[in-house]
Amino acid sequence: MARKELVESMHVPRESTKKSPRSFKYPVFDGEREAIIDAYNRRIKLYGMSPLDLQDVKMNSLLEVEPALKDIEYSKIIVYSVEGDDEDWELSGFTKEGIISGFFPKHIDAHIWTAFTENARRATPYTGKYDRIVETALRKKSQIPAPPEGYSCEVAKTDHAEDISALLSVTFQDYPIPIDLESIEKRVDQRDHYFRIMRDVNGELAAVASAEIDFGRESAEFTDCATGNGHRGKGLMTFLLWQIEQDLISTYGISDLYSLVRAMEVDVNCIFGKLGYQYSGRLINNCRMPEGWESLNIWCKTAREGSIGDRVDKLSFSARP
């Protein structure tokens, strides 16, 4: 299939509905490959597919599975694929945006290929600023953080969900996934979501972060990072993420760790630099935020032998060291 035909086959006429669910996940083909139709962020994510597989996927047929998602205009298509087929991906109209180390089972890296159906969403006017932020983060020396004086760190429980939801809601005017009380309660209760919180001497919730664990893939994504007003600049998030990392490695045996960090957030990018994570690409205009589309930097670390550096240093991602 030619480049234009492939991209146009993924284009859905724009007739948005406010009542659409945010996303819907289901297996494709043999059940090992998945599709996530994400109405809220107007993107379609496909996992474990090759360019040949993609030609056999009919987007309108996928959308029939959940009719409420059909009338959205999906302007970004993201494929998490194994290494190889670069030429075929490029001929199909896709660009490689990055790598997530050990994302697939057996510690196989995910190579992320994307295509846009709207020129406006493809535009990247802040690339220079994003690159400077990454360059600053990469210059940070790796360090093991000390617990901030006067603060305590603990694993979150269901009765902490109200405080967590309130802090996330105050910190973010908009968020790619639901952060209402009921949604946070469900995520805290789920085995594949691991939350830690930090409280000050008065018991006030000062910071929160979580890891979404994929036990089958033995990987985890850091997310839900928020620090309350009056508690910033004290190293709380650095210690909190480090503690979660230690728990994932020692308790759960998770060896591949990553985070998708808002490209404009200087502090959070620098935290991952301090913790020894490596930059491995950028997802352009990947999710909705109050200011518009938000690009996300990929930061990875592996607790296994070897570094991901030799797997990504030949790529042409912006801000490679």
Image (cartoon, helix red, strand yellow):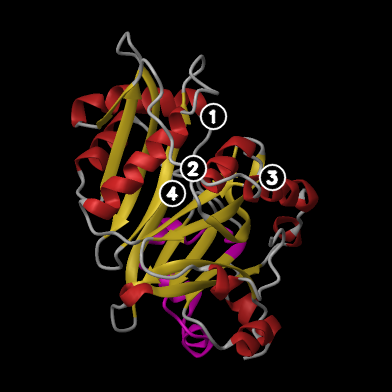
Residue at 46% of width from left, 67% of height from top?
Answer: 101
Judging depth in this view, the residue of 317 and 23 nearest the camera is 317
Let me know if residue 233 is in the magenta part.
no
Q: Which residues are magenta?
A: 48-76
Q: Find residue 279 and report its image quarter.
A: bottom right
Circle 2: residue type: Gln
Circle 3: residue type: Thr
52 w.r.t. 201: above or below:
below
Which of the two discs, 2 and 1, sits closer to the camera? Answer: 2
Label 2 or label 1, whichever comes before in sequence order: 2
Label 2 or label 3, whichever comes before in sequence order: 3
Judging depth in this view, the residue of 140 and 300 nearest the camera is 140
Give the structural element (helix, strand or loop) at label 2: loop
Q: Residue 46 at x, y = what percent?
A: 45, 71
Q: Find the distance from the CA under tag 2 to the CA under tag 1.
A: 32 Å
Q: Find the distance from the CA under tag 4 to the CA under tag 2.
A: 44 Å
Query: Is the Cβ of the residue at disc 1 closer than 8 Å to that at disc 4?
Result: no
Q: Is residue 154 left or right of residue 293?
A: left
> Where, quadrant-wise, is the N terminus in this rendering?
bottom right
Q: Which residue is mark 4?
A: 20
Circle 4: residue type: Ser
Residue 61 seen by the camera? yes
Query: Is the Cβ of the residue at disc 4 closer than 8 Å to that at disc 2?
Result: no
Q: Which residue is mark 1?
A: 173
Q: Which residue is mark 2?
A: 143
Q: Which residue is mark 3?
A: 136
Q: Find the distance from the CA under tag 3 to the CA under tag 1.
A: 27 Å
Give the structural element (helix, strand or loop) at label 1: loop
Which of the two discs, 4 and 2, sits closer to the camera? Answer: 2
